[in-house]
Image (tube, rainbow, N blue to C red):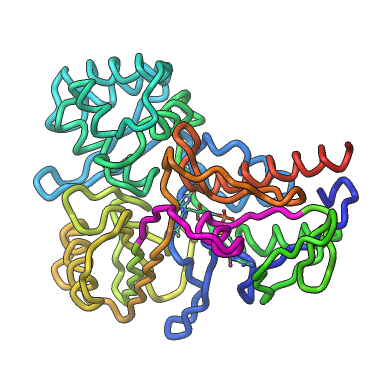
Amino acid sequence: MAEQGIDVHLFEAAPKAGGRTRSFYEGKVDCLCDNGPHLLVGAYQTTQKLMQDCGISHHIHWQSSLHLPLWESQRGSFSFKPTTWLPFNLALLKAVGELPGHDQTSPLAMVKLATTLKSDMDDSCTVQEWMQQLSMPNQLIHDLIEPLCLGAMNESMDTACASSFRRVLHESFSSHKQARLGWFTKPLDQALIDPLCERAQQLGVKLHTRTCVRSLQEIEDSIQIAGQSFQHVILALPAYATDRLLNRPTSCETRAICNIHLWFEQEVHLPSLLIGSLGTTGQWFFDVSSQMHDQSKLRHLCAVISADQSKLDDLTLVQIIRDEIRAITSLYALTPVHYRIVREKRATVLVRHDHDEQVLPQAVIDASERSKPGDLPATIEWAVQRGENAANSCLDRLKR
Ligand SMILES: Cc1cc2nc3c(=O)[nH]c(=O)nc-3n(C[C@H](O)[C@H](O)[C@H](O)COP(=O)(O)OP(=O)(O)OC[C@H]3O[C@@H](n4cnc5c(N)ncnc54)[C@H](O)[C@@H]3O)c2cc1C
């Protein structure tokens, strides 16, 4: 909008922009730390375009093709790695068949899954029901479907919306390029938020931090915010925050994500920069120091628990995660010199078919995180797409 010469003001309640993609300074270990590691997939086209436009694409490291390292106590380290010399769909089948403990039923089940990616689906169907309809083998659910569902939807299979998960699979598993994983090579503040704010300010956007918008006062055709009058307002908040702002009860469900950051003086390296761990409390382990090419003395690892509903106290959790890292790395003695647990209680708003339809003041455009079945789940890509769609509809209204 600012590129089109529109006068744009951005109101942010926190002292800094960033929201759920934010970093904080961890003084004890003198480092900028993300609330949690953020993974991207090649299918995040809108995010990549935004980063290109701002000249910061190089802040993401992209795998050359999909490589999903996995670990389980019985089977040790293994990988889901579709070979690049085959077309992606064939490579996928080959890779599934080569997973340890799988037989020909797994590739056959993948073929069946692929055939249903475009067919109609009931909005209330869960991922678990979908998998039951497909008679998906338990081993394939355990090794791939369940971890992917938790990672992408931040929700377990028994309640996660099948049609949105299907969209994630359809968009991501469509080519080698779309399926690969990417991660930021700097803390989120430096990789994404600061450059985006700088770019916005260069374009003339006025950024008002520490400004919590508590009400939208309608006066004739405009809306009053912080003593100023605006012709149009875009709400780019999680649904519960929008509901609070509009002073109405919220019914939207959320799930937590728990991030356990550990710092070690020892030279501890995971078998790969990220690893999906099966049957453990930590579901994903990130070698943050290696991802960020950090040469400092301390090694920073982070374990992630999606859809976290555990009530473990901090010390117990740290011990469990430390023991799981010991098992993954085969290191006998391992003691973190520092830890920080970030529990994002409302990390994502879940995909639901019964999200209330909004009755909004004429001047307000809703870009809230409120995914319906078939929409993308709450991700960076969905946030960027929602923002872009809202900006386009605002521009359309201005042209009228
Ligand atoms: C721990 C964690 C890990 C994640 N991992 C991934 C991942 O690997 N990949 C991925 O794609 N996505 C991931 N996500 C999801 C992703 O971070 C979010 O979906 C995305 O950042 C949402 O962006 P948003 O701009 O919609 O909302 P937010 O980032 O929540 O931004 C909303 C902003 O509005 C501000 N605000 C709220 N109320 C008011 C008010 N009344 N007035 C003014 N300002 C207000 C808030 O302070 C905030 O800055 C993760 C999220 C978390 C929490």
Pick the residue in front: 85 or 115: 115
Q: Is residue 21 visible?
A: no
On the image, the x and y values in percent for residue 291 come to 45, 57
Residue that extends furthest to the front in the rendered view of this protein: 220
Q: Is residue 318 left or right of residue 152?
A: left
Number of marks drawn: 0
- Quadrant (top left/top right/bottom left/bottom right) for the C terminus: top right
Q: Is residue 149 above or below residue 25?
A: above
On the image, the x and y values in percent for residue 26 come to 47, 79
Point 28% across, 21% down: residue: 110
Image quadrant assignment for residue 345: bottom left
Q: Is residue 169 visible?
A: yes
Q: Is residue 8 above or below residue 314?
A: above
Region rendered in magenta = 233-257
Q: Is residue 267 left or right of residue 40?
A: left
Pick the residue in front: 64 or 323: 323
Q: Is residue 315 left or right of residue 149?
A: left
Does the magenta portion include 284?
Answer: no
On the image, the x and y values in percent for residue 2 come to 83, 52
Q: Is residue 332 left or right of residue 128?
A: left
Point 52% across, 34% down: residue: 43
Does the magenta portion include 256?
Answer: yes
On the image, the x and y values in percent for residue 113 come to 31, 20
Point 38% across, 44% down: residue: 153
Point 74% across, 71% down: residue: 208
